[in-house]
Amino acid sequence: MTSPTTASQEELKANKVPLGWRDQCSALLIPLNVCRKDKFYMPWECEHERHTYEKCQYDDYIRRMKALSKQKLAAAEEAAE
């Protein structure tokens, strides 16, 4: 299943995204990095792209923490039986 915020491996390779940054929000990182490079890394120039990317990262973190808490609850219930 591909998310609209996940770039393909070919896109990531073409844009030289490091392996550590190839996550669920990788498709949003590519335009952010392009904007940063074009605007000489001036922080006020790419605010919209950065905000969109950081929101995606936060939502992904919350999703993973919810999944982890469900997994821990299921393990605790299984251990109690």
Image: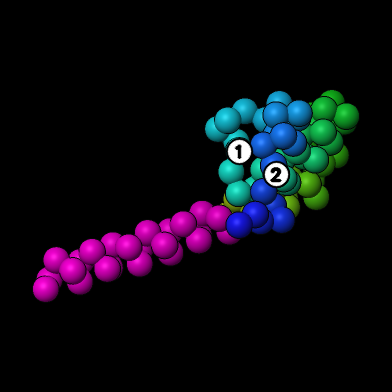
Q: Position of residue 6 (x, y in %)?
A: 67, 48
The answer to whether residue 48 is magenta is no
Q: Is residue 15 above or below residue 77?
A: above
Q: Is mark 2 on a helix, strand or loop?
A: loop
In the image shown, does 61 or 4 lie closer to the viewer? Answer: 4
Identity of the amino acid at label 2? Answer: Ala
Q: Is residue 52 above or below residue 23?
A: below
- Say whether marks 2 and 1 touch (CB < 8 Å): yes
Q: In which quarter of the image is residue 40?
A: top right
Quick one: which residue is furthest to the left in this view? 81
Res. 31 mark: none
Residue drawn at point x = 80 percent, y = 40 percent: 31
Q: What element carries label 1?
A: loop
Q: Where is residue 4 in the image (x, y as percent from the top left)?
A: 71, 56
Instruction: Give left or right: position of 49 versus 1.
Output: right
Q: In which quarter of the image is residue 81?
A: bottom left
Q: Name the residue under label 2.
A: 7
Q: Where is residue 14 in the image (x, y as percent from the top left)?
A: 76, 28
Q: Mark 1 points at which residue?
A: 22
Instruction: Give left or right: position of 31 versus 62.
Output: right
Q: How crowded is mark 2: few (under 14 residues within 10 Å), some or many (20 or more)?
A: many
The mark nearer the N terminus, 2 or 1, is 2
Tell me which segment is drawn in magenta. Answer: 59-81
Residue drawn at point x = 32 percent, y = 63 percent: 71
Identity of the amino acid at label 1? Answer: Arg
Q: In this view, does 14 lie above or below 62?
A: above
Identify the image quadrant of the N terminus: bottom right
